[in-house]
Amino acid sequence: MRIILSNHSQQPIYEQIKEQIKEQILTGEMVPGQELASIRQLAKELKISVITTSRAYTELEAEGFIATRAGKGSIVLERDNEMIKEQYLKKVEESLMQIIQYARMIKIPKEEVFRMYELLDDEE
């Protein structure tokens, strides 16, 4: 498990940890049954508070990505494809809402936003 924290990010540290672990689970870098670093171990490695890592793990558990077993640590849970798709759809919707807000602020027509999308999509 690799976590890279940015002090320049507007995203809180616990959120950075949560999102990076979630991404590693969704992309298959972390597999079901894989053990995560303990809360204390991760806090020590990242040189942050145990409270911060605990919050990230708690939220991952609440979202169904990991399970914590008393005295045994946390493991990655099995994910079904529908849940994975739903997670990505949510991210796409959030990003599109932000794009729409920016476009409206500077009065960019929808057609121009669509052209930007097509150009960027063609580059890949």
Image (cartoon, helix red, strand yellow):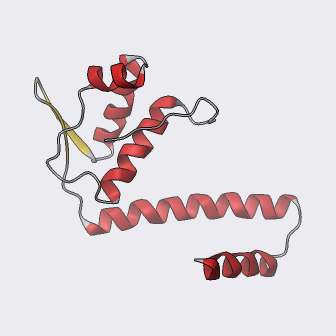
Q: Residue at x 54, y 64 (%)?
A: 92
**Which quarter shows the N terminus?**
top left
Q: Residue at x 82, y 63 (%)?
A: 104
Q: Nearer the viewer, residue 92 or 24?
A: 24
Q: Is residue 17 above or below residue 51?
A: below
Total numbered labels placed on residues in the image:
0
Q: Is residue 12 above or below residue 2?
A: above
Is 100 on the left or on the right of 52, as rendered?
A: right
Is 113 on the left or on the right of 68, as rendered?
A: right
Q: Position of residue 53 (x, y in %)?
A: 37, 26
**Which quarter shows the C terminus?**
bottom right
Q: Residue at x 56, y 63 (%)?
A: 93
Q: Is residue 64 above or below residue 54?
A: below
Q: Position of residue 76 (x, y in %)?
A: 21, 46
Q: Nearer the viewer, residue 116 or 96?
A: 116
Q: Position of residue 22 (x, y in %)?
A: 37, 48
Q: Position of residue 36 (x, y in %)?
A: 23, 37
Q: Residue at x 21, y 54 (%)?
A: 31
Q: Quadrant of residue 18?
A: top left
Q: Nearer the viewer, residue 45 or 105?
A: 45
